[in-house]
Each structure stands twice: as C-alpha cells, then as structure tokens.
Image (tube, rainbow, N blue to C red):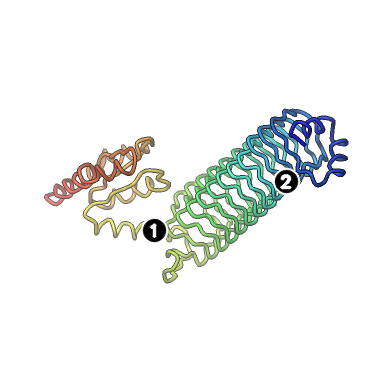
Amino acid sequence: MENQEHLDILKRGVEEWNKWREEHSEIQPQINGASLNGVNLSEINLSGSHITNSFFGGTKFIGANLHGVVMHGSTVNDADLSGADLSEGNFSGVNFTQANLFRANFTRTYLMRANFRGANLCEANLNEALLSGAEFYFANLGKANLIRADLSTAILTNAWLNMADLSKANLGGSYLVSALLSEANLTDAYLKGANFSDADLSDANLKDANLSRAILVGTNLTRANLTNCFVHGISCWDVELEGTIQLNLVITPSRQPTITVDNLEVAQFIYLLTVSILAHLSRFVIVDLTSPNSVPYELGTLVHQCIVPFQPILLEEQHEFAMLQDLRRRHDWFLPTHTYRELDDLLASLEAKVVEPAEQKAQELEKR
C-alpha cells in the first residue's frame, strides 16, 4: 500500500485508523508530506510508522501510541502529546517547540538535535534517551526522569530541571547557563566541561559526579551535596557555598594517585596554583581562546601573577572577550591576539606570528 493510501485512511479519523491497524498489523505505515495541523489524533496507534516531512502544529496526540515511530523533517510544535508513548523511536531533529509533553514516555528514544524550546516535559520519562545536541531553551523538565540519558553538548539555557533525576546522565560539554536545578539528582553524572554559569543547584545531589573542567561562575550551590566529586580543572568563581557538603573532592586527573580536599575553593586554588607554577617555569605561554570556556577568568589571575609573555591565538570567526582588552592595557606581556582561519593556516604562521613575538617579548622582559 502506497503512502497516499495510508494518509487517506489517517484523515478519516482515529477510530477508522486504529481499526485498520488492528486488521493489518503486518503493515508498517508510511506517511510523507502530511499536513494535519490542529487535528485531534488522541489515542491513535501510530506505532512503528515512518513519518517524514509532515506538519502537526497544534495537533492533539494525547495518550497516543508512537512507540518505535521514525520521524524525520517534521514539525510537532504546539502539539499536545501529554501521556503519549514515544519510546524506542527516532525523532532526531524534530521540532517540538512549545509542545506539551507532560508525562510523555521517551525511554531509549533517539532525539539528537531535537528542538524542545519552551516545551513542557514535566514528569516526562527520558530514561536512557539520546539527546545529544538537543535544544531546551526555557523548557520545563521539572521532575523528569533523565536517568542515564545522553545530554552531551545539549543546550539547557534557562531550562527548569528542579527535582529532575539526572543520575548517571551524560551532560559532558552541555550548556546549563541560568538553568534551575534545585533539588535535582545528579549522582554519578558525567558533567565534564559543562557550563553551569548562574545556574541554581541549591539542594542538588551531585555525589560522585564528574565535574572536571566544569564552569561554575556565579553558581548557587547552597546546601548541595558534592561528596566524592571529581573536580580537576574546575572553574569556580563567585559561587554560593552556604551549607554545601564538600567532602573528598578529587582534584587529580583520572589514572593518577588520588588527592582529595574538602573545599571547592581550595580545589580551584590548587588547580590555579599548579597552572601558575607551570607558567612561571615557561619561557612563554600560548593561550588558545577558541571556545575558551573558563580560560578568560583564569587568565585574569595568571597574567597578573606571572610576568612571562602570554600569546593568545583565536579562530578568525570567533570574538575575543572584552575583558582581555583591559588585561592587555595593564600588562604589556599579554600580547596581541593572533587570529587564524583554519589549522593549516595556524601551523604555517606559528613560527612568525606566535613563537617569534613571544620570544621577542621574553628577551625584552629579561632586560628589565
């Protein structure tokens, strides 16, 4: 049966569609180019269907069965999928903007690069869901189940994750600026390189989490539990730590003898001290400002303490932090930034544009 015949049956309504599915359970529906905006498809059985290039804006899928559905190039914005079963399907790249996904089931579903901007995912089940690169601007994930979910490089700016269960989840490189994670469960979560700037993690449980190279600038950690966290290379500035449990914080990299401290600020200090010692022992320091994460904040401390040439490099399409201009005015050993178009361009200009200016400044500093 061709796609058009499937679409025609679907347009006759949920009752007739579900009856046809029961009578033809061996058929895998193929739906392409459907435009069913605002239609009521609650309780429909679309399990196992392949849906492409379709539009379901404002459509009602309340309690619908979308188990194992493969959907590509489609839009489900403003739709109501509350209580729907979308488990073990593939909705990668699908637009769920402003959709109501309250208590929806996304267990082990592929959702890479999906757009959940402003969506309601409160109490949704995203256990072991694959959400890498997905966007959750201003989305509500309160009390959601995200156990073992892959949220690597996901954007959760201003998202609500209060009381969400993110235990054993992968949030490596994710962006959680100004996110609300009060009372969230992040035990044993992988948070390496995640950006929690201005986020609220008050009363959150981060026991055994990996916070290596994470950014905590202006973060609220009031009464949070950081017991046994890995914090090597963490960037921690203006953090609220009243009542925070800080026991056995591991400051050494993996596969090295374990050294622990019981204070996050001490961990930050030891990390910066180590970097500072290395800088003092160096002839000059080359600083890559491309996707800098916490580097600008660390430079503010290091350049002031270490009178050695600092030579910044930056990918041409990116912009330098404004604070670095002030740093350059106050310390002449912080050199002008060398920009490059691509790696080959950098390698070709490395000697003349990076090494030689740094060496020249080093010789100048020796004469002072």
Q: What secondary structure is marked by label 1?
A: helix
Q: Which of 102 and 202 is in front in this view?
A: 102
Q: What secondary structure is marked by label 2?
A: loop
Amino acid type, callout 1: Phe
Image quarter (top left, top right, bottom left or bottom right) of the N terminus:
top right
Q: Which residue lies furthest to the bottom in this view?
A: 257
Q: Is there any visible trace of residue 103 in the rendered image?
A: no
Amino acid type, callout 2: Leu
Give the residue pinned by disc 1.
269
* Of marks 2 and 1, the one in the foreground: 2
Q: Which residue lies furthest to the left in this view?
A: 367
Point 46% across, 49% down: residue: 238
Q: Is there any visible trace of residue 89 in the rendered image?
A: yes
* Tag of residue 193: none
At label 1, counting other C-alpha atoms closer than 10 Å, the crowd grade (few under 14, some 14-19, many 20 or more) is some
Left of 264 or right of it: where is 7? right
Residue 18: % across, % down: 85, 40
Left of 277 or right of it: where is 359? left
Point 54% across, 57% down: residue: 190
Looking at the rendered structure, the number of numbered marks drawn on it comes to 2
Residue 192: % across, % down: 49, 55
Give the residue pinned by disc 2.
86
